[in-house]
Amino acid sequence: MTARAAVIMAAGQGTRMKSPVPKVLHKVGGRTLLDRIIDTVQAAGCERIHVIVGNHSPEVRALVARRLGEGAAVLQDPPLGTGHAVLCAADTLADYDGDVLVVNGDCPLLQASDLEPLFELRAGGAALAIMGFEPQDQLLYGRLIRGADGHVLRIVEPSQCSEQERAVRLCNAGMYVADRADLFRWLSRLTNDNPKGEYFLTGIVAEANAEELTVRAHIASETAVMGADTQMQLSQAEAVFQQRRRAHFLAEGVGMPAPETVHFAWDTEIAPGAVVEQFVVFAPGVKVETGAVIRAFSHLEGAVVREGALVGPYARLRPGAEIGPDAHIGNFVEVKNVAVGKGAKANHLSYLGDGEVGAGANIGAGTIFCNYDGFFKYRTVVGEGAFIGSNTALVAPVTIGAGAMTGSGSVITRDVPDHALALERSPQADKAGWARAFREKKSAEKAARGKK
């Protein structure tokens, strides 16, 4: 197979997003648009990937360096059009021999399977393969004008279309595959003789035709190539992504009584036989095993839920939470960086942060793991079979031994031995008649104020 490389266009400022966040760093499914494109071209077999970046977005360059290495970012400065952007990668790819894919950095729904037909056209003899699509609204897109044999003759911008060309439904998606040498030879010949004074990537079609080379188009679905230039388009892409994920999990055997209310991240893993109730949100990094139930209105991020566990309703699992087999995390319980053992229960109104809960332990309502002193985090360990009384504050670092108990309302600051009872509260004092006298006194004061 011919070697494959990719040039990702990510130098645009994305002004239509009206956001301080660079366009390609907005997210779909909890993953940036640029990360998603990098994932896609990697899955398509591109061994070399370079991303065109601008001086205005150091955050984009930082992402590229983190994912692909410092040398993967190619600066376009100043920005002189799409053709100029790709040409900026000529020196970087000078030692490369193979096909080069040019792809937009803001197409979050593009998949490797959508790109494969372009490489197949190249393998079949096309010097230039172009991605086309048939949008419902052709107003903003250049038309792909083809001959009777399907050969692409030219790309015409919408403002320059004749009446006959405007009726053409096939439009340019802005993605191309060509041999490296051909691509950069064509790009070097482009001119900026146009009202914008820019070098347009679409000009490579005319250059290929001038050399009497074969230019072919693959027609992709509009969804596959849809961009995300505005907040509205971003939300539309998110909706499509969620529909796909819901369909995937339902087909895999995940129970969802109201799938339209559940939101997934790009890397959510849910095993067949698990159940997800209404209005659950999965942020990135969640894995749910078979038989687990995620009840309504729960939020999970960076967490693992083991087989048969019950989470929610109204539970929050934060990064590092690992809920063991058959464990219960109930309503208004927050778990962060805590491993909860098999069959352990925290059913009500508790915060468990930094530590571990042993198998079969019971965490009473209102329990707090006091894990932070304003400077550092500390761990709380609750042993197997321990019973934590309601409204207990466990001041970390602290260990509650196996089978130990704490009295309700205690503030535990020292380790508790196995099977011991820890109590920390003042003795109760009863003052006979005090409540009656207090009410009488206050009633009289209120009545006196009312007369004034």
Image (spheres, helix red, strand yellow):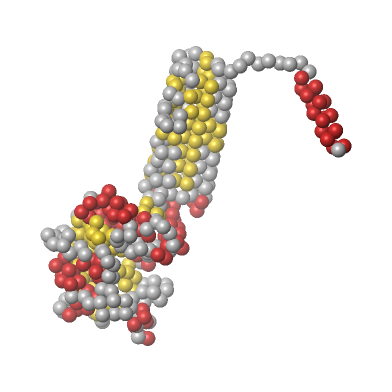
In front: 266, or 232? 232
Residue 250's place in the image compared with 317, above or below, is below
Image quadrant holding the N terminus, namely bottom left
Relative to 434, 129 lies left or right: left
Query: At x 85% / y 33%, what residue is drawn?
Result: 448
Residue that appears at 58% across and 21% down: 408
Q: Residue 195 at x, y = what percent?
A: 32, 80
Q: Position of residue 360 (x, y in %)?
A: 47, 24
Confirm whether residue 152 shows in the render: no
Image quarter for residue 230?
bottom left
- Quarter residue 254 falls in: top left
Task: Answer above or below: position of 176 versus 148.
Answer: above
Q: Position of residue 183 (x, y in %)?
A: 18, 69
Q: Is residue 451 above or below residue 429?
A: below
Q: Quadrant of the C terminus?
A: top right
Toward the front, the furthest residue is 452
Asked if residue 329 lies left or right of residue 269, the reply is right
Residue at the limit of the structure toward the bottom, as seen here: 163
- Residue at the image point whose x is 13% and y is 62% from the top: 94
Q: Is residue 152 left or right of residue 427?
A: left
Residue 234 appearing in the image: yes
